[in-house]
Amino acid sequence: MLGLAFSLPAFALLVLFFIWPLLRTIWMSLSDWPLLGSSHFTGFDNYVQAFQDEQFLHAVGFTLLYTVVITPILLILAFGLAFLVRRGTRAARAFQTVYFLPVVIGLASGSYIWQFMWQSDIGPTTTLLGKFGILDPTRNFFAEFGSAFLIVVGMVTWKVVGLQMLLVLSGMQAIPEEVDEAAKIDGAGQWQSFWHITVPLLRPTLALVLVFSVAGSLLAFDQFYIMTVGGPSGSTLTAVYEIYRAGFVQFRVGYASALSILLMLVLGLVSAGQMLLLRNSDN
């Protein structure tokens, strides 16, 4: 009873801010629920419509493309930076701080900064590269899918890789030094030690990093809403962006709730799959 009494406040917050809103969203997804006015139950009509909605299917496809591109970039760079700063020297700690600094900047702030940097004529990046004749400073990079997509990927990498570096670094530092020393005594080279010792021991850390990265990518919204506004011609609309448009632009809250539930199921399945694939053999 004492343990129950101590846990009740946390359980009340869980019910109030997670379980009840989730149940409410599920009920709304089964109804024709306008933002204003009365609603009525429609069953699974919203879910059927979601699989027939070409705009939403395109948004899901683009979200998956973005996830497939950004996830390996972040993982590889996080590994590389973690190896560079894993030594406890003063220079390593200084670079560790430098790499982590963008993490403390809000995603919206970082999006506005990069959007200004790549503005035609007035952006410092376009102006500087234009002076060296590398590109046309009058070119609108956000009017083309390829350049707009790469700029967003660059911004997210700059913003997020520092956090993933710290996660990988913490996993590396948790590996006992005796393991590496034993491998060296047995004649293992750096690559053999990395592939057969470091990577297997980092599997729990890698699982955490991948779950964070994939979840953040599948839920991407701010950077595309600010930097590309879904353009050009709706080519950078993400799944969350489409949910926002359905709920707060078209005022179809029931349909937006159904899309949210579908995205939640996909995210749960993907995260569970990653955890199963990367779990330790003894766990």
Image (cartoon, rainbow, N blue to C red):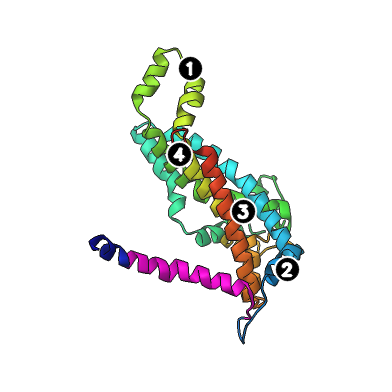
Q: CA distance from mark 4 to mark 2?
A: 39 Å
Q: Is residue 155 magenta?
A: no
Pinpoint residue 249: horizontal percent, then vertical percent: 65, 75
Left or right: where does residue 227 sit relative to residue 103?
right
Q: Which residue is mark 3?
A: 152
> How many numbered marks appear?
4
- Position of the C terminus by quadrant: top left
Does label 4 or label 1 sit earlier along the sequence?
A: 1
| Camera-nearest label, 2 or 3 | 2
Separation of residues labelled 3 and 1 (CA atoms): 38 Å
Circle 4/circle 1 CB separation < 8 Å: no
Q: Are marks 2 and 1 in contact (CB under 8 Å)?
A: no
Counting residues from the start of the chain, the first of labels 2 and 1 encountered is 2
Q: CA distance from mark 3 to mark 4?
A: 29 Å
Q: Is residue 209 above or below residue 139?
A: above
**Which residue position is annotated with label 2?**
49
Q: Which residue is most to the left?
A: 2
Q: Earlier in the sequence, mark 3 or mark 1?
A: 3
Quadrant of res 3: bottom left
Is there CB contact under 8 Å for labels 4 and 2? Answer: no
Q: Which mark's residue is nearer the viewer, 4 or 1?
A: 4
How far across and how far down the image is residue 192, in percent?
50, 20
| Residues packed near mark 3 inside 10 Å, few (<14), some (14 to 19) or many (20 plus) | many
The residue furthest bottom is 37
Amino acid type of the residue tagged 4 in the rendering: Pro
Does any portion of residue 82 appear in the rendered image? yes
Residue under numbered circle 1 = 189
Give the magenta range: 9-34
Asked if labels 4 and 3 touch by Cβ distance under 8 angstroms, the answer is no
Identify the disc placed on residue 204: 4
Inter-mark Cα distance, 4 to 1: 24 Å
Of 21 and 214, which appears nearest the observer? 21
